[in-house]
Every structure is written in C-alpha cells, then in structure tokens.
Amino acid sequence: MARDVTFIHLTDLHIGDPAQDDHLFSDTRATLAEIVRLVGTIQPKPSFVVASGDLSNRGDAASYGMLKALMADLDMPVVYALGNHDTREGFYRGMFGREDDLAQPYDHDAVIDGIHVVTLDSSSPGFIGGSIDEAQFAWLADALDRHPELPKLIVSHHPPALGDAPDWAHWRTIHFDHSQRLAALLKGRNVIGILSGHIHHDRVSSWHGIPVVVGMGQHAATDILRSDVLRMVSGASFAIGTIRTSGLSVAFVPLPADRAELNVYPLELMLQRAAPVQAAAE
C-alpha cells in the first residue's frame, strides 16, 4: 500500500418512520443525517463507507428510498450489506429499482482505493440469526481468489461465532458450523478485518487472528450489563477505520446519549427466532 486508507463503518441504521412504526425506538433518520454531516467534516476525506446491514427497520422499499436520499450527501462509494431486518425484495426494489431475482442473496465485491471489500449476505429471511448457504460459500471462494495480492475487508451483518463450541445465544452470530467453515476459508487470504453489526454494541475481537469489528449502530444500544433479558437503551455510534501496511485500526465515535430504556425482550423470544439451521435442530 502506498498510503493509509480511511473508511467509515456504519451499521444497524434501521431507517424508517417512528410515527408509523412502533418497533422503531429512535429517530434513525435524524441520527443518520447527523452522522452524514459529521463524516463530511473528516479530513482527509475517507475513501468509502461500509453500512453493514439492518439498513431498514421494516425492509419496505420506501425506507431504502429514504436511505438513498440521506446518503446522497456523501461524495464517496457506499458498500451495503443486508441484515435480518432487511428484506431482499425491498432492498432491490427501493435501492436499485430491480424487479427480477428478488430472493437472491446480496453478495458482492469491489476494489476501492486498493482495498478488496467482499460483502456477504448473512441474513436468513424470517429469522434473527445468520447463516451462509452452499452457493454463497462457493461465491466467496471465487471472490477471495480474484485479487489475492490486495488486503481484504469482509463485510457481514452477523459477526462470526467466536467460541470453540456453539453459544447458547446463537441468534447473535452466524451459525457456529458456518462460522467454523468461514474461518477455514478465510485462512491465509490476506483478510485484515471483518466488519459487522447486529448485536448493537461496539466490540472488537480477534477471531483466528482476524480483527472482527462490530458497531453499535444508529438505532439503539444493547445494555451489556444485563444478561437475563435483552435490554435496549438509547445510544448510537459510528467508526472511523484506517488501513495501514501494519494492519487495521478503528476509532469509535459515540453520539451523546442518556442510555434511557427503550425496550426489553425476553431471551426466549430470541432463541425461538435464531436461524433456520438451529430451529430445525431444536
């Protein structure tokens, strides 16, 4: 790499209208507008933006139109991934005006400023947890081979499962077996980081030697001090990533918040809607 490359990581944007959506707990359009304004002040100008899923709260085509309008003030490429709140049909129609192959996973890759960004659709329609199917693993293997000399960022809404055995809270991750297979596929592929969201709190992990950066997002924050329920409180952040020859560094930018309680979910509900592969085994 001839120079440092800076990028912005957004996630869990949950764009929608809180006046019409009783499952939207904050004014996410106002939050994103403020973040877009702040990003516009960053110097040197970032090379690209990653928005790693849950772009919409309801997955309706109109919400993706809102997102496009909000992001229009950013004069830089935007890499979108899909999450469990998104729908492929709504995304394709609202973002691209597409009317065919609406059920296909949104897997794609691009080289931006010398960085190979590979985006994997980990959403499992109708479920909370993440999964990767056979066709996607085949696509990913081909994508990783396209630019072996370039540093790679992997974008996936669900982070991989970090442990050596399945986690009881498996709705938070890509299915454990799929995560293990993903680790084997990424080994030795010049992957400098994985960008994810879904769990609604900022977290950095080393997973088989790869930094996994998870963002809190722009909708709400998980109260990680509570383990008996899923308690959501007010909070939002975004991240500034810098890629150097030495690797990836990330700085989180929190927005002011009072951590007021927004909603509480029983863990049983999360378990019931984890992912189809787990649901079939239980």
Image: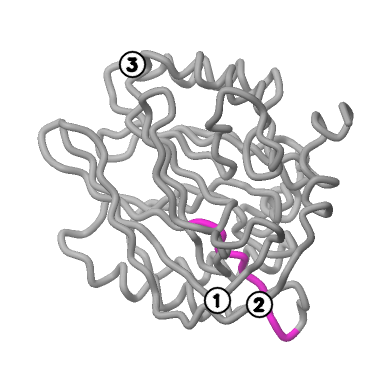
Instruction: Give how far apart the Cα atoms at labels 3 and 2 are.
Output: 45 Å
Q: Nearer the viewer, mark 3 or mark 1?
A: 1
In terms of depth relative to the viewer, which is nearer, 30 or 68? 30
Mark found first going from the N terminus, 3 or 1: 3
Mark found first going from the N terminus, 3 or 2: 3
The image shows residue 36, relative to residue 112, as above or below, that is below
Q: Residues within 10 Å of mark 3 (few under 14, many from 20)?
A: some
User: For the residue marked with disc 1, what is the amino acid?
Assistant: Ser
- Residue 126 visible here: no
Quadrant location of the C terminus in the rendered image: top right
Mark 1–mark 2 contact, CB under 8 Å?
Answer: yes
In terms of depth relative to the viewer, which is nearer, 261 or 187? 261
- Residue 67 visible here: yes
Residue under label 3, please give it.
148
Residue under label 2, please give it.
262
Q: What's the magenta region?
A: 11-19
